[in-house]
Amino acid sequence: MQYQRRNTIRRTQFLEKAALRFLPSFYVTLVVFLLFNLSLAHAANTKNTNALHLFDQGEFIALKHLQQSIHTANNCSQEIDSLVEISHRIEHDFSLTETEVDSLLQKQGIFYTPSEKTNWESKGWLEYKVINRKKRYFSRSVSNLKLRLQQVNDSITHSQAPLDNLTKFRLKHTAQIIAQTTRNGGLSVPVNYKVTYTISVNPDAVPAGDTVRCWMPYPKQDHTRQTDVHLLSTFPSRYFIAPDSVGQRSIYFEQKAKQGEPTIFRICFTYRSYAQSFDLSKIHADPYDTSSPIYKTFTREQPPHIVFTKEIRQLADSITKGETNPVGIVTKLYKWIDHHIIWSGALEYSTISNIPHYVLKNHKGDCGMQTLLFMSMARYKGIPVKWQSGWMMHPGEVNLHDWCEVYYKGIGWVPVDVSFGLQPSGNKRIRDFYMSGIDSYRLIINDAISAPFIPTKKFMRSEPIDFQRGEVETSKGNLYFDQWKYSMQVEYLK
């Protein structure tokens, strides 16, 4: 590095002398200015390289010191600022010490030898990172490990865990949907909702008098499955609703922060949601028109997470070997994920460079992670598929949720919920329901990933891929999830 720097200085000095001898004074000034900025760019690139090395090594304290030294010199680097921001998010995710994890394992009745614990860590079952030269464990590492150990035990004993309340509810609900569906792909079993959604920014997270900008999730209205959206009230009273055509729909507010008080944003709305069910045995898709806008748009890559890597290509080809029918391809990809990828509580998406790669490496992932893996393989195989997400609204199980829709020529868009998987039923239609159907307990906010907001957000988003909780920023920067809280109250109307 020092040798490269000395050569750069020598080249600069030589060119300055040449400019002084042969060029008019205006051009001398221009050349010297450009060369000066070139040397600054080289120095900036060196600092960015050092910053990336510190980030990769988990040396986040040293990374912050580097950032501070750059700012003290009245310089700036968006790349380093972004790395520091992401390092903060990683520290927030990996918040548990080894002592705390050992205590949680004991409380969960998980007993182990040191070699067993080391084995779990090496497999990624007990997820940790070395941060500032100390082990820090993922906040949900123990609950995720418990799920994994239960899965292994069930596989060994050939037993099935007792059905939880959500699974029981879904089995009953999907049977009702199938019974009431009069035509393939028809709508049925509508459910009416009243939703109150609140975002509360922590007291003094923002200096008094500064303007807090807030984007809250708002229902899409261009879906046959989601209708009768009515806004009942808001706080504050002034707002802007993004057009329904945007990929990720929001309602936007501004409000001044007050000293010692939380900054509150609240909306109340009603809507109706329908279930939809397709019988896969009755779907006979026509050949795709590969020149059509739908095909081109929804079979393309979308870096950094929908990328046709060598790993994705080889896996998709091996799973679907010999299959050319779109329904058959989708079925095989869906069943492979159901059989090989366990649901797990997820890291924040903004901290993962390639989500499908992470899922395949660790054989685990939440609903959005599994969906992105499915979308990557399906698109590579020439199946148009688009993202869809928002909330699952099942009684007692209201939560963030992601799924997708597959396009079959001659049929249209068919909902697919990858993470809900194959249901434990001897009835094939009920078992396969979520491969070509969706229940009534949904709130659709998004039809795309990483879509821009209206109005535009100025700073790095807390969640750059999905949009379900909301986004908040001030004039100084983004407010991450640890600086505000969200809550949803749901009423089921007749």
Image (tube, grey):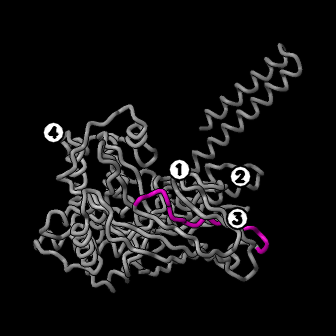
Q: Which of the pair 191/235 is nearer the observer?
A: 191
Q: Nearer the viewer, mark 1 or mark 4?
A: 4
| Percent x, y of residue 436 | 27, 57
Rendered-image quadrant of the C terminus: bottom left
Instruction: Quote the CA–CA distance across marks 1 and 4.
Output: 44 Å
| Percent x, y of residue 251 | 61, 64
- Which residue is found at the position 75% from the left and 78% from the top? 258
Upstream in the sequence, badge 3 or badge 1? 1
Upstream in the sequence, badge 4 or badge 3? 4
- Identify the element where label 1 is drawn: helix
Upstream in the sequence, badge 1 or badge 2? 1
- Identify the element where label 2 is drawn: helix
| Percent x, y of residue 402 | 40, 62
As drawn, the label of residue 70 is: 2
Upstream in the sequence, badge 2 or badge 3? 2
Pointer 3: what residue? 474
Instruction: Quote the CA–CA distance across marks 3 and 1.
Output: 30 Å
Pointer 4: what residue? 322
327 on left or right of 262: left
- Identify the element where label 3 is drawn: loop
Instruction: Quote the CA–CA distance across marks 1 and 2.
Output: 16 Å
Crowd rating for badge 2 (residues with CA inside 10 Å; few <14, some 14–19, many 20+): some
Tell me the magenta residue range.
208-224
Q: Which of the pair 248/304 is nearer the observer?
A: 248
Q: Is residue 21 inside the magenta stretch? A: no
As drawn, the label of residue 53 is: 1
Q: Is residue 327 visible?
A: yes
Q: Nearer the viewer, mark 4 or mark 3?
A: 4
| Percent x, y of residue 213 | 68, 65
Q: Could you tell me the amino acid type at mark 3?
A: Thr
104 on left or right of 58: left
